[in-house]
Structure formats: C-alpha cells, structure tokens
Image (spheres, rainbow, N blue to C red):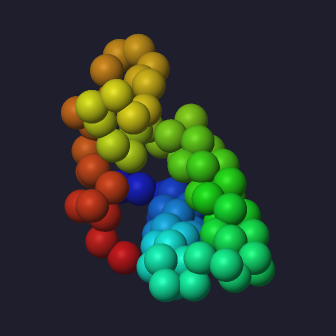
Amino acid sequence: MISEAQKRLLLSIQAIEFTALELNLYLNTHPDDKKALSDYNAACRQLLSLKRDYEARYGPLTNFGYAPSQFPWQWINEPWPWEIMF
C-alpha cells in the first residue's frame, strides 16, 4: 500500500511531465517563442527536482541507468509507479 504523499508526488510528476511534453510539441512549431522556451526550461527543472525527490523517498521511477538504487536493489519493490491506482 502506498501513502497519500507518494500518490500526490507521483501525480505532480505526471502533471509536470504533461506540461513539458506539451511545451515541447509547441516549440517544435514555434521555436522563436522565448516565453514558451522559458516555461519549458522551468518545467524541466521542476520535473527533475520532483523525480529526484520521489526516487530519494520511494525508489526508482525507471530502470536501465536512469536512476541509481540504494541497497538493496529497489527496482523489484512493488507496486511499480505504473501499477499505482489513483
């Protein structure tokens, strides 16, 4: 069972990932929009911070070299992020 704090943090990560993705797509067609680029870079920084916070508290979000693991190996801990029911 996961805590409400873990769910909230994961939802925040998903929201910022969505924002970064949408801004990325927008910038593909509007590369000279300084405000959008600034917003994209801010979202990327926030996303990195949220992911680091999540992984420090609850374990890796991804595997294959994207997130270091504490001992013992944490990737096998369940539930995995995509298995969490909201």
Q: For the point 72% across and 64% down, which residue is it?
A: 42
Q: Is residue 1 above or below residue 73?
A: below
Say whether residue 86 is visible.
yes
Q: Is residue 63 left or right of residue 7?
A: left
Q: Residue at x 43, y 32 (%)?
A: 67
Q: Position of residue 62 (x, y in %)?
A: 33, 43
Instruction: Please tell me which residue lies in front, 54 or 33.
Output: 33
Among the 4 quarters of the image, the one containing residue 40:
bottom right
Looking at the rendered image, the quarter that the C terminus falls into is bottom left
Q: Residue 7: horizontal and vertical position, in percent?
A: 48, 65
Q: Residue at x 62, y 59 (%)?
A: 44
Residue 9 figure quarter? bottom right
Q: Nearer the viewer, residue 1 or 68?
A: 68
The residue shown at (60%, 49%) is 48
Q: Quadrant of residue 20?
A: bottom right
Quadrant into which the N terminus falls: bottom left
Q: Is residue 3 depicted above or below 49 in this figure?
A: below
**Left or right: 32 in relation to 21:** right
